């Protein structure tokens, strides 16, 4: 009865979160400084995957989350320059400083900036480039896209007179093509050194506000929750039925299944919260990734222990226990650091340098564990064959086949992850080459 009540609460929570509306994927800027890059000053505004709008009708107050519109909305964007920069102008002057908002899709990255006579690439138009690129000196070099001359989008904001601050008009830029979009705030004015900006941008997809990389995961975790819930019910029924014959290993399996169910539920709620608020609370996301790291560590140690014959061939691991616990602790720390870097407070779809390099030790530990597991499994099979333990040998052969199949699927998944890793890595390098 107690378990059935818990299931009822979980299903009710799912329905509650599914019917709630969402607000935005929000990027906040709090006095972010413009840093000098080549002949420009810039602030990175964000990078997300976005689907093309399914409608061209204007945005209204009655527009809903699933209105088919995809856009980036600017709200309360304020630029503040130094008093020294403002004092160089009089109150009677009209435009005394230009800031440009640049939005471009990944395939159009070469349409921003230019190079005179094969020299270093410049973001801002120089006298030489003004002749070659037909650009306006002191502004960002923009070459119209071959597919849509309106892109890349460049919005202009001006300081007036001797004002210390300038506010951008709240507006939306609609996404007309599916792709990875990047946002930069750029100034070509050398007097704007030390300038800062504040405000926020809302990034919306046609069917919600989750970033493109995360949007499909909500439905995925609903399916996973139901799958683990079904597995938990089946396991619990067998657990109760054969209670008197339960092995210590089966208690560990029950813990891993329970953690897996808890993890996917937390992940769904985390994405639902992000979808509804546009913010990833550090505390909630840290708890989610920690539960996931514990689950991954325990499941690997459990498979390693079974491969060594623990609970079936030998009652304890003996002197090797310390090594198993040490590799488990190392794997937990590596996984926790990777997951915190990848998920905690992260909205952008482009991975940072830290995530790129933390993938490598995690992958090395996974490979080491797989090698140790199969080496231990081979020794255990030899021992069972020597002792002629037919029943246990048959069980371990089935376990070996299942493990080999799981490893094969893991290798396929790792291949996909590696391809995705290198795509992300090179895209990140391209951005660095263009703007750093």
Image (spheres, rainbow, N blue to C red):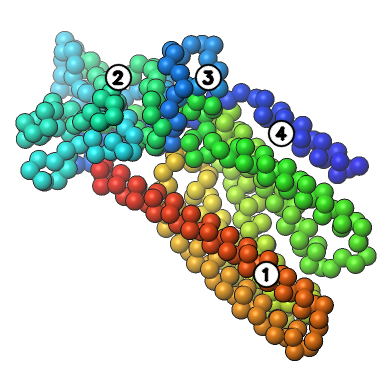
Quadrant showing the C terminus: top left
Dot 4 lies on which element?
A: helix
| Mark 2 to mark 4 CA distance (whole Å) | 45 Å
| Residue 309 occupies quadrant | bottom right
| Mark 3 to mark 2 CA distance (whole Å) | 32 Å
User: How many numbered circles are shown?
Assistant: 4
Residue 4 vertical position relative to residue 54 in the rendered view, above or below? below
- Disc number for residue 419: none
Closer to us: mark 2 or mark 4?
Answer: 4
Residue under label 1: 401
Q: Is residue 43 left or right of residue 336?
A: left
Seen from the viewer's position, the closer of residues 238 and 36 is 238
Residue at 16% from the left image edge and 13% from the top image edge: 93
Residue under label 3: 67
Query: Residue lying farthest bottom?
Result: 386
Residue under label 2: 166
Q: Position of residue 159 (x, y in %)?
A: 24, 19
Q: Is residue 436 left or right of residue 74?
A: left
Q: Position of residue 89 (x, y in %)?
A: 15, 19
The 10 Å Cα crowd at callout 1, few under 14, some 14 to 19, many 20 or more, is: few
| Mark 1 to mark 4 CA distance (whole Å) | 36 Å
| Mark 4 to mark 3 CA distance (whole Å) | 23 Å
Are discs 2 and 1 less than 8 Å apart at CB? no
| Mark 3 to mark 1 CA distance (whole Å) | 49 Å
| Residue 399 occupies quadrant | bottom right
Seen from the viewer's position, the closer of residues 27 and 12 is 12
Q: Position of residue 231 (x, y in %)?
A: 77, 51
The 10 Å Cα crowd at callout 2, few under 14, some 14 to 19, many 20 or more, is: some
Dot 1 lies on which element?
A: helix
Q: Position of residue 120 (x, y in %)?
A: 14, 46
| Mark 2 to mark 1 CA distance (whole Å) | 66 Å
Residue under label 4: 14
């Amino acid at each position: 009865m107690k378990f059935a009540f818990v299931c009822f609460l979980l299903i009710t929570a799912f329905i509650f979160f599914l019917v709630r509306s969402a607000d935005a994927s929000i990027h906040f800027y709090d006095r972010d400084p413009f840093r000098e890059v080549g002949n420009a000053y810039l602030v990175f505004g964000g990078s997300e995957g976005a689907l093309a709008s399914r409608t061209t009708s204007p945005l209204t107050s009655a527009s809903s989350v699933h209105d088919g519109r995809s856009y980036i909305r600017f709200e309360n964007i304020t630029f503040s320059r130094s008093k020294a920069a403002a004092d160089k102008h009089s109150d009677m002057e009209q435009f005394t400083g230009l800031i440009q908002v640049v939005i471009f899709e990944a395939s159009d990255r070469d349409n921003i900036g230019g190079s005179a006579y094969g020299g270093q690439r410049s973001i801002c138009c120089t006298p030489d480039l003004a002749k070659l690129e037909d650009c306006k000196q002191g502004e960002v070099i923009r070459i119209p896209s071959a597919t849509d001359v309106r892109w890349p989008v460049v919005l202009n904001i001006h300081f007036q007179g001797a004002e210390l601050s300038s506010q951008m008009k709240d507006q939306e830029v609609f996404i007309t093509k599916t792709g990875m979009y990047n946002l930069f705030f750029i100034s070509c004015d050398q007097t704007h050194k030390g300038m800062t900006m504040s405000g926020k941008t809302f990034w919306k997809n046609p069917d919600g506000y989750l970033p493109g990389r995360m949007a499909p995961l909500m439905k995925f975790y609903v399916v996973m929750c139901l799958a683990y819930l079904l597995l938990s019910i089946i396991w619990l029924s067998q657990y109760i039925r054969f209670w008197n014959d339960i092995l210590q290993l089966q208690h560990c399996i029950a813990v891993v299944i329970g953690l897996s169910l808890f993890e996917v539920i937390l992940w769904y709620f985390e994405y639902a919260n992000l979808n509804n608020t546009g913010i990833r609370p550090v505390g909630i996301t840290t708890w989610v990734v920690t539960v996931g790291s514990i689950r991954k560590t325990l499941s690997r140690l459990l498979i390693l222990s079974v491969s060594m014959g623990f609970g079936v061939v030998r009652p304890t691991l003996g002197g090797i226990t310390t090594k198993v616990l040490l590799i488990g602790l190392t794997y937990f720390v590596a996984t926790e650091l990777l997951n915190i870097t990848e998920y905690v407070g992260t909205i952008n779809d482009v991975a940072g340098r830290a995530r790129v390099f933390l993938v490598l030790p995690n992958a090395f530990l996974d490979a080491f564990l797989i090698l140790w597991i199969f080496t231990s499994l081979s020794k255990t099979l030899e021992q069972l064959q020597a002792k002629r333990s037919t029943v246990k040998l048959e069980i371990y052969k089935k376990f070996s086949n299942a493990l080999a199949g799981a490893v094969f699927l893991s290798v396929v998944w790792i291949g996909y992850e590696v391809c995705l890793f290198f795509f992300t890595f090179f895209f990140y390098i391209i951005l660095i080459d263009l703007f750093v």
